[in-house]
Amino acid sequence: MQTVCGLDIASTSVCACVQKADGTIVKELNLPTTREGEDRLLAVLAPGSAIYMESTGRYHLTWARRLAAAGHEVYVLNALLAKRLIGAANALRHNKTDKIDARELAALGRKHGEDLGNYRYREDAPRMGLRVLCQVRVKQRKMLTDTLKSASGILATMLPEVGLSLSQNQGLATLFLKIDSLARLRGMRLATLEEYACSKAEELHAALKKPLSAVGLFDALLPALQAQLRLIESMREEQKRIGSQIKEAAITAGRQEEVKLVETIPGYGPKTAPTIIACIPEDLRSWGPKQKVARKLQAYFGCDPKLKESGKWKGRVRMSKRGVELARTALFQAATCALLHDPDMKAVFDRKHAEGKFYRVCITHVMRLMLRRLVAVLYDRKPFARITSLQPQLAQK
């Protein structure tokens, strides 16, 4: 009889519940998230035990790796799946403690273990490296956007007379890094300003010739603006470096061929394609036919429809947003890009918009069709080819 163990893992502590196959509790432990805690758990586990834990970002990884290396069967479950499959013993009171969570995970493993094979933990360091790099790029891009907003706010305080945008004109950063005072900026000729300010050069030149409302603030705020601009330059350089690292990571993970296939679909580019591939398992064919795979991926990404109804009340259908945010965001970006480069997707969007649908509802329909194309390309291992005979049908969807 195989021993079953449920693990509720937090940042500093772990609660373990070891049960026999008939549900008898063998041992309950409160463990620290240290090597000593792992050793204490391994000491009470029978060989070949089945261990069930929820995915917790990074906290579960050390435990899953160590227990799998010791020869145990480790299953890492989605938290939403675990919540749906737990037994009814605690349904009425619905108490929430670490000990109860560990017991319910062990009971879930006993009852549904045969159906949870897809959640068996398998070490895939290259794929994880690719995915984490994509996550880091997104976070760094957000930091860059926030820093640009901060610098633009400082610049607007220094020159409220001119609407200058640092995000739309990168030459402005070079301009304000070259000067050391307002007098230096005012002494520049129009031809020099045109090299950096482009279409805003004449407006800037004209404003500098007139009395400015923030003369006293300009020189005082210039060092702060330049500090932000130097940080922006370094972030942009880092974005370029991490883009190259993602390409190398895709090759190391053996997913470069899939990335190239996805890039043949209009809308998917060098940033969105590797991000989505990093979030997709390699064994798509084992999930069933294409339509089933597309539905599963739609739910996995969290872009499936969610409806709420109660009696006569009917709520609006919304995107569930319960899946992988990284992949969902990349799919949204790809769908938005497809509106500019793919007439078929633009026709679908326009038709839904003409029906009175909101923008996000229209773009969700495009995302669904983009996901179907993605599955078709990866399933057949062939580049995207537009079927002209199906274009009228596609426009009606």
Image (cartoon, rainbow, N blue to C red):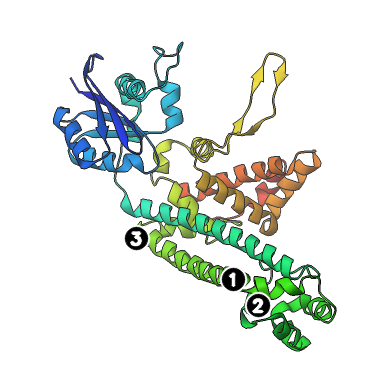
Residue 383: image x %, image y %?
A: 51, 57
| Residue 165 in view (yes/no) | no
Residue 273: image x %, image y %?
A: 51, 56
Say which quarter of the image contains residue 187.
Answer: bottom right
Quarter of the picture holding the N terminus: top left
Q: Which amino acid does the dot numbered 2 rest on? A: Phe
Q: CA distance from mark 2 to mark 1?
A: 8 Å
Name the residue rendered at 76%, 89% in the picture.
189
Q: Which amino acid does the dot numbered 3 rest on? A: Thr
Label 2 crowd bin: few (<14), some (14–19), many (20+), radius 10 Å: some
N-terminal of the two: label 2 or label 1? 2
Q: CA distance from mark 3 to mark 2?
A: 41 Å
From the viewer's perspective, is residue 2 above or below residue 238?
above
Say which quarter of the image contains residue 130.
Answer: bottom left
Query: Are the residues tagged 2 and 1 within 8 Å (C-beta)?
Result: yes
In this view, the residue in front, 272 or 108, is 108
Q: Which amino acid does the dot numbered 1 rest on? A: Leu
Which secondary structure lies at badge 3? Answer: helix
Which secondary structure lies at badge 1? Answer: helix
- Per the image, the residue denoted by label 3 is 252
| Residue 330 in view (yes/no) | yes
